[in-house]
Amino acid sequence: MDIKLEKDADLSRMTIDGEMSIYDAAALKQGMLDALDNCQTLEIDLSQVSEIDTAGFQVLLLAKRESQRNNKVLRLVNHSDATLDVLETYQMADLFGDPLVLSAKSAKRSKNDTAKGR
């Protein structure tokens, strides 16, 4: 996993490249909390996340909770298929409140699931 952080005034942009797994959860947690401490708005680009497990998802939940607790803004953007799958599986997209743009692959899978009554 590789984390890149760009800061512009009160907005920080974090890009995560690779897996968000239990093996990287501690570093990911610290990176997100440090970024939140140093900005008013944190935007996390998830487009390069290849895999996310429950630990990775829990770090996102923690960051969201901490942003709300500190009256800051956390936005998840450019969701990868892996992150969309986790948000859908846990039915948590509404909690984050970010617009989700489905890839063609995800949209087709969602349409098939609806047709099958899932």
Image (cartoon, rainbow, N blue to C red):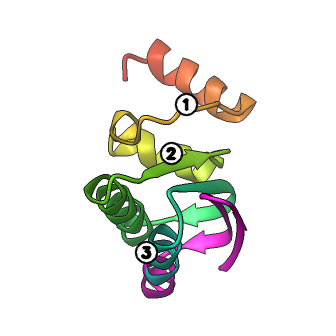
Residue at the location (63% across, 25% down)?
107
Q: Give the percent coordinates (x, y) of residue 59.
A: 39, 68
- Of discs 2 and 1, which sits in the foreground? 1
Range of magenta residues: 1-29
Q: Give the percent coordinates (x, y) of residue 82.
A: 58, 53
The residue labelled by disc 2 is 85
Q: Which mark is residue 33?
A: 3
Query: Which of the two discs, 3 and 2, labels the residue nearer the N terminus?
Result: 3
Q: How crowded is mark 1: few (under 14 residues within 10 Å), some or many (20 or more)?
A: few
Front residue (pair 20, 70): 70
Tell whether 98 sits left or right of 102: left
Quarter of the image where one finds residue 106? top right
Residue at the location (36% across, 33% down)?
94
Furthest residue in direction left, as rendered: 69
Q: The residue under label 2 is which amino acid type?
A: Asp
Q: How crowded is mark 3: few (under 14 residues within 10 Å), some or many (20 or more)?
A: some
Q: What element carries label 1?
A: loop
The residue labelled by disc 1 is 99
Q: Residues within 10 Å of mark 2 (few under 14, many from 20)?
A: some
Q: Name the image quarter holding the N terminus.
A: bottom right
Q: What element carries label 3?
A: helix
Q: The residue under label 3 is which amino acid type?
A: Leu
- Of discs 1 and 3, which sits in the foreground? 3
